[in-house]
Amino acid sequence: MSCHRYVIAAALTAALVAAGSPALAGSPAPVDYAAGVVAADNAPAAAAPSTQVASAIAWKKCGAGMQCSSIEVPLDWGAPEGPKIKIAVARILADKKPAKLGSLLINPGGPGVSGISFLPYMPYIISDDVLEQYDIVGFDPRGVGASTSVRCVSSTAEMDKLVGSHFPTTKKGRAKSIKNANRIGERCNALTGPLLAHIDTASAARDMDAIRAALGEEKLNYLGFSYGTKLGAYYTELFPDRVGRFVLDGAMDPSKSGEATSNAQLKGFDMSLRAFAKDCAKRRCALGSTRAKVLTTIGKLLKRIEKKPMKTKVANNLNITWATTGIVEALYDEYTWPELEYALVQAAKKGNAVPLLKLAYSYHERERGKYQSNSSIANLAINCLDYGGVDSSLASIRRAKVAAKKISPTFGRYWIGDGVDQCAHWPYPQVGQPHAISTTTTAPIIIIGTTGDPATPYAQAKALSRQMKTSRLLTYVGEGHTAYGRANWCIQGAVDRYLTKGTLPPAGKRC
């Protein structure tokens, strides 16, 4: 089962849309995110020259069948001789050694998801033919996990408050929201330092080329999911002559603004919620006998929770933020719909909020009373540099709420609060700029889109394919986020043939 999920934060809210791979027995030990803070003060800089690397990677065994290491890269690629940061890498060697086709770098999405935590799952996702011929390499992007990392909180309770705060609905609540936004930015800056100004996607793409160089490979072979498609697309712009075999699954459209991406996701999750409701009604579930009745039950539950959070005997009560987060978590994959049904029935019919709260905890990788990674914080920090803040005036927020309700009668009410956009109060300015990808690469590339993808709607895969002239769009007709490793053998076979033989699927291929 694929574990990669989640892309970008809703632009007009401080909501964090981030997650990653659950911990796996035998994977690297939890990281101390207080470590590795860079002590330097450099503002964001323009694009840098070609990647330089000092030496090859020195690998050591680190459990779960992996070898681990790290490389040093410039904090600021515009000042390559300046302070350095660490990029953590890991690999699983090819079944047939040496690897006939070299290395395949993977990124599971986010932004903010650890590629190293995800790596032990790859033998269950990637086919044997690919595993035989490639060393599979994962990495933690700058700001994430075992690399030099972002840190904004110092306790579980503080993190709970950040990701689970109720959207304000009063003037006093809005004032508190503005105060909290400033405080979060100040805390991130104090605990992380100048790294906070240099974790944009373009910088991470340059780090990928440093990994390629350290691996001693002429071209980069790459498998990116969700946000990983944006990272891969940026790489093709920066290093068009170094593009090997690229698969971009669950494609983002890099030309969309943060607000447009948020609205597209809202529409996608509404579509998935309706698909869930139809499936639930078809099976005569306890939520309702028709799709409309199921949606009505869910809507009434959310309004009840909005008015009065449901009490629990665990660390947090189920407020509207946790409730909607829990629903969204289960909509990423149709295989978790039964879990969603159970959680909703428990909350709506039996007054038991814990199952839905646990889904929300899973979304943010909160397990055993603490957060297992910094993915949610890194997601926020990266998006603030890539997209910047938006107009958070009350008039603008109210207009956006009206539009959101039209997009999704169930979710729209909660997608946008009366607070402020966290990125509008970020200590560092936006350095990225949404734009259509313009690459001169001649390498053929596979872009995969799923027709029922809630997080990266299918229209974005079509848009990215139009932007990348040498790409071939491969379509999975089904539900869920991404396709390779979780869809069917039609998708699996098409990608495997490309990765092992360089053979593209036929134009217009649908599975």
Image: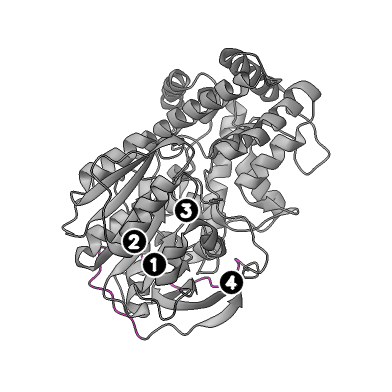
- Does the magenta run of residues contain 3? no
Q: Which residue is mark 1?
A: 104
Q: Look at the numbered disc 3 and give the secondary structure of its residue.
A: helix
Can residue 236 be seen at all in this image of the molecule?
Answer: yes
Q: Where does label 2 land, which residue?
A: 499
Which residue, given by chain and number where applicable, does mark 4 sit on?
35
Mark 2 residue element:
helix
Residue 286 position, x and y percent, is 71, 20
Query: Residue 306 appears in which quarter of the rendering?
Result: top right
Q: Position of residue 90 (x, y in %)?
A: 50, 72
The earlier-in-sequence mark between 3 and 1 is: 1
For the residues labelled 3 and 4, the Cα–Cα distance comes to: 17 Å
Check contact, mark 3 vs mark 1: CB within 8 A: no
Residue corresponding to mark 3: 381
* Image quadrant in which you'd find residue 64: bottom right
Q: Amino acid at mark 1?
A: Leu
Magenta region, main secondary structure? loop
| First reached walking from the N terminus: tag 3 or tag 4 | 4
User: 84 and 458: which one is in front?
Assistant: 458
Query: In the rendered view, would you say 43 is above or below 158?
Result: below
Cβ atoms under marks 3 and 4 closer than 8 Å? no
Residue occupying the point 39% across, 76% down: 99
Tell me which label, 4 or 1, sits earlier in the chain.
4
Q: CA distance from mark 4 to mark 2?
A: 37 Å
Q: Nearer the viewer, mark 4 or mark 1?
A: 1
Magenta segment, which residues?
A: 33-54
Q: How is the image coloured?
A: one colour
Please report contact status of discs 2 and 3: CB closer than 8 Å, yes or no: no
Instruction: Check disc 2 and give the amino acid type.
Output: Leu
Residue 202 location (% of width, % of height): 32, 59
